[in-house]
Amino acid sequence: MTTVYDIPADILIRQVAEELKKNPQIQPPDWAAFAKTGVHKEMPPENDDWWYVRAASVFRRVYIDGPVGTQKMRSIYGGKRNRGSAPGQFRRGSGSIIRKVLQQLEAAGYVSHTSEGRTVTAAGRSFLDNVAHGLKAEAAGTAPGLAKY
């Protein structure tokens, strides 16, 4: 069976984001159009569907690294803050975005909250593995050069 580990992250995240758009429990909040993804960013994301892409990325990270908490996820999505002529310093990503995404994934039944942190449920593991399997089958059927994963 194909798993998340067998598919490149960028391809998997793009497809999972498309699948999450179909789920009514995964919706960007009203403030998402104006929010930056962290203090290290100067502007909000340009992609209109950035909420779904971030949700897919967080979902994949919980699958791979779980159990994880909001603070660890903030460190994963952080970056270097531009401080002008002073050297840049690392800043963590937005906790509110990650928290809301994790809460929405919990409401959808893909992630569960345990004492150690958030982990992927059996339904979430099945969802991601089915998407990965579909991508592998699609790549195998389209061109011989794409059958590498």
Image (cartoon, rainbow, N blue to C red):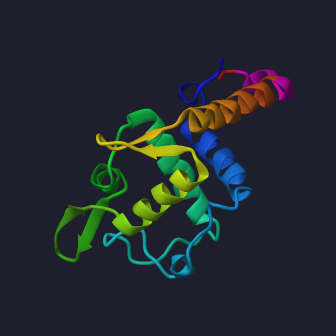
> Residues in magenta?
141-147
Residue 123: quadrant of the picture: top right
Residue 127 rendering spot, x and y as whole percentages: 65, 37
Q: How many marks?
A: 0
Give the percent coordinates (x, y) of residue 59. 51, 46
Which sits in the foreground, 46 or 67?
67
Taking the spot 70% from the left edge, 61% from the top edge, the residue there is 24
Which of the image's four quarters has the C terminus?
top right
Name which residue lies at 60% across and 30% down: 7
Give the image quarter of residue 114. Answer: top left
- Tell me the quadrant of the picture where the N terminus can be found: top right
- Identify the residue at horizontal 57%, vertical 30% (top origin): 4
For the question of whether residue 22 can be seen, the reply is yes
45 shown above or below 136:
below
Image height of 33 relative to 111, above or below:
below
Residue 133 falls in image quadrant: top right
- Chief secondary structure of the magenta portion: helix
* Residue at the far left in the pictured view: 86
Q: Position of residue 53 (x, y in %)?
A: 58, 56
For residue 89, side relative to residue 52 (left or right): left
Residue for point 39% across, 77% down: 42
Q: Is residue 123 magenta?
A: no
Furthest-top residue in this view: 1
Relative side of 101 to 89, left or right: right
Left-right relation of 65 to 133:
left
One can see residue 94 in this view? no
